[in-house]
Image (cartoon, rainbow, N blue to C red):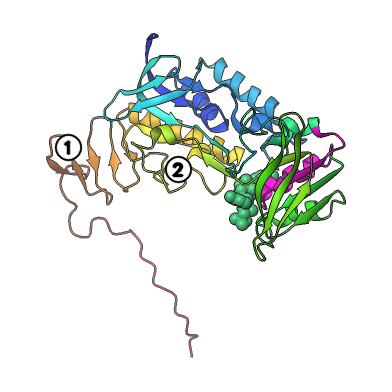
Amino acid sequence: MKETLHREVVIVGSGPAGLTAAIYAARAELRPLVIHGPQPGGQLTITTEVENYPGFAEGIQGPELMQQFEDQAKRFGTEFLITFVNKVDLSQRPFTLWTEEGHEIKAETLIVASGASAKWLGIPGEAPAPEGLGGLGVSACATCDGFFFKGKSIVVVGGGDTAMEEATFLTRYASRVTVVHRRDSLRASKIMQDKARGNPKIDFIWNADVKEILGTSETGVKGIKLQDNKTGEESEFACEGVFIAIGHKPNTDVFKDWLDMDAVGYIKTAGVSMATNIPGVFACGDAQDSVYRQAVTAAGTGCMAAIDAERFLDSLPVATPTGEEVTIEGEVVSADHEQITMPDGEVVSNHPDGQPPAEGANQPAVVYARPSTELPS
Ligand code: NDP
């Protein structure tokens, strides 16, 4: 067993969400500890040009952007620990996290910013070598591996923005890129579709399921086995690389026994705050966002989670997913803000003087009449 660390704010994940949370918590002098796996910086470090992160008029490379985040977090005293969290106990505060390296970490507040990972099809040939051809022509990251496919014929699987982006990017290297999609229309945004459809190096195979990736460890990828899901007809398609681009899964498995999540694994947060169902645990970024999933929204929610953690540590009420607010002492403010349930169960008024308001006291000062839709005769 390695040392036990005890911190006021522990952040799991070092993408835009986790590092923004770290910057805010560090500037609030909470000495945050960021725990991240061997791929620091999250998904942006496997991206090239980022053109939509505000503040960079000419765009910036993903890895460079994340290096800036990290340097900024370090400047205010953020500590980093490179390891995986493999077990947590969130039954009481301080929360306990255990890592693969054998650390035991006590956290007064926890910010989950563990992001999301690429999804796989689960077909023969897809697994990492030596079981499959992963690393021998199968990849889920065009930016990482596209360079190895100069002059080759590549298949991209998927019909969303990621698939269009990867296909377009891969035409820099490949002789031909074929997008294989399971339906006859794309999920991708119009602009991304237009870019891919207009690219003379890209073509499409529709209504097709990839059943197997063909090849051996000696030859690498030689093709794919396809099935037309309208006719059932099977065929083989020759290619030398396969990029799987079918979406992502949030990296939240280690928290699943504790935190409320949707069916995919996205952590449920309060909406008006980044609070989870457990007071003192907050979530931000792609671990809780199935809709926007952008670097800037991740950073924004990281900021919110850090401010929520600061408020919680300052004994101030923080909104929870039920609409109630909780404090670190265990007081619960009702969703209508009318009353407080104290830790011993006593219920008291939440009005300034402890008394319920006098009749009419909370009425707005001016009440505007609803304008008539009828014209005066
Ligand atoms: P999406 O969930 O949007 O798309 C996944 C695609 O993969 C869909 O076309 C889906 O098919 C297909 N798919 C899923 N599972 C399977 C399977 N088992 N077998 C075959 N096909 C499968 O994920 P993306 O990663 O593309 O995008 C995620 C989010 O990130 C989106 O909001 C997107 O807009 C955003 N994004 C934005 C970018 C940009 O603007 N630069 C770049 C990349 C992503 P079906 O359509 O039939 O469901």
The residue sitting at 56% across, 16% down in the picture is 74
Provide residue 321's location: percent of width, then percent of height: 35, 46
On the picture, is 228 further left or further right than 109?
Answer: right
- Dividing the picture into quarters, in which one does residue 42 lie? top right
Crowding around mark 2 (Cα neighbors within 10 Å: few <14, some 14 to 19, many 20+) is many
Residue 100 seen in the figure? yes
On the picture, is 157 further left or further right than 88?
Answer: right
Instruction: For marks 2 and 1, give the one nearer the viewer.
Output: 2
Residue 48 seen in the figure? no
Amino acid type, callout 1:
Met
Label 2 residue SS: loop
Q: Mark 1 points at which residue?
A: 342
Q: Is residue 200 above or below residue 239?
A: below
Provide residue 275's location: percent of width, then percent of height: 38, 39
Residue 142 is labelled as none
The residue sitting at 50% across, 34% down in the picture is 302
Crowding around mark 1 (Cα neighbors within 10 Å: few <14, some 14 to 19, many 20+) is some
Provide residue 255's location: percent of width, then percent of height: 39, 34
> In front here: 353 or 168?
168
Which region is colored magenta? 149-173
Gap in angstroms between the C-alphas marked 2 and 1: 33 Å
Q: Name the residue under label 2.
A: 265
Q: Is residue 171 on the magenta stretch?
A: yes
Say which quadrant the N terminus sits in. Answer: top left
Provide residue 305's location: percent of width, then percent of height: 44, 34
Total numbered circles: 2
Q: Is residue 28 on the magenta stretch?
A: no
- Which comes sooner in the sequence, label 2 or label 1? 2
Amino acid type, callout 2:
Gly
The residue sitting at 44% across, 75% down in the picture is 371
